[in-house]
Amino acid sequence: MSIPEQVVRWLSGVQLVVLFGVLILRRHYQRVPFFTIYVGGLIALAAFLALNYTWNGFMISAVATAALRFGVALELTRCIFGAFPAAATTARRVVFSILVVTAVICFATISPSATYTRVHAEAVPRLGATGIWILTALAGLVLWYRLPLAPLPRAILLGYAPYLLVYTICMSLYFSPEAQPYRSLIGYVNSGSFIVVVGHWIWVAWGTAAETSVPQLPPPPAVVVPHLSDRLRYDRSRP
């Protein structure tokens, strides 16, 4: 691993440690516990890759990250739609449909005689694409139902979907034989995009108190009940 790659990897790891600390310090783990687990899992996987920087280690890390990402998507579904039963039912159906379609496509398009590398080269980008579709569907449902969104879930939702798009493109190119000379550049683009997203999450998590992580609905309009003396005065003034 070159020195610039080591610098980028260490910078990304330090950012994740800072984000994990901010989530604990500002008590966001009470509202988004699985996102906190996701950040901690990424830290553990980064340490695993540092000790086992091989092809198999990279594949294990990619699959584990995809599993944690699905958990974050399900938690966002709960956070956003938990107080809205009709929207929550629609969101669960959409997420389940996306997972079923992805599983069917993965098993139907991969040949039984495909090599180990080829299987992962096709499966990993599709796992990333599944995350994109789930987060995009959640964002569309938020707009459709006009649901209020807390600052941190909004930052996760609106920051993760664009990054996963970049991640999927980078992974597709990374496994492509034609893009072998540009693997280092692809890695820098992917890592740089993730650094930007994590930096945004740190900014929002630090600037948002734990008690404000739940969207506040506007209070119902007050009903003005006239005083008894006002009602008597009104009745006397009537002909």
Image (cartoon, rainbow, N blue to C red):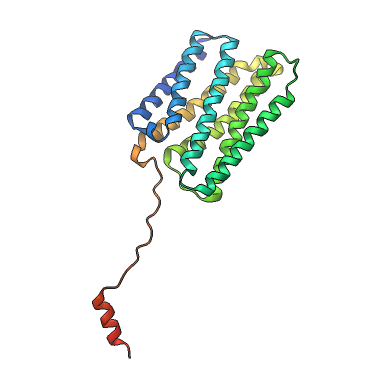
Looking at the image, which residue is at 26% across and 82% down? Answer: 233
Looking at the image, can residue 233 be seen?
yes
Res. 209 visible in picture: no
Q: Residue at x 67, y 19 (%)?
A: 121
Q: Residue at x 64, y 25 (%)?
A: 125
Q: Nearer the viewer, residue 2 or 53?
A: 53
In this view, the residue in front, 204 or 65, is: 65
Q: Quadrant of residue 134?
A: top right
Q: Is residue 117 above or below residue 18?
A: above
Instruction: Point out the residue furthest to the bottom here.
Output: 239
Picture coordinates of residue 21 (x, y %)? 36, 25
Quadrant location of the C terminus?
bottom left
Q: Is 73 above or below relative to 15?
A: below
Name the one closer to the observer, 40 or 160: 40
Q: Residue drawn at (32%, 87%), measured in percent from left and top?
A: 238
Q: Is residue 96 above or below residue 57?
A: below
Q: Quadrant of residue 106?
A: top right
Please state the total of marks drawn on the protein image. Answer: 0
Instruction: Residue 211: give x, y in percent of width and height.
Output: 34, 40
Quarter of the image for the N terminus: give it.
Answer: top right
Residue 70 locus on image (x, y percent)? 54, 30
Q: Where is residue 79 shown, x and y percent of the image? A: 46, 40
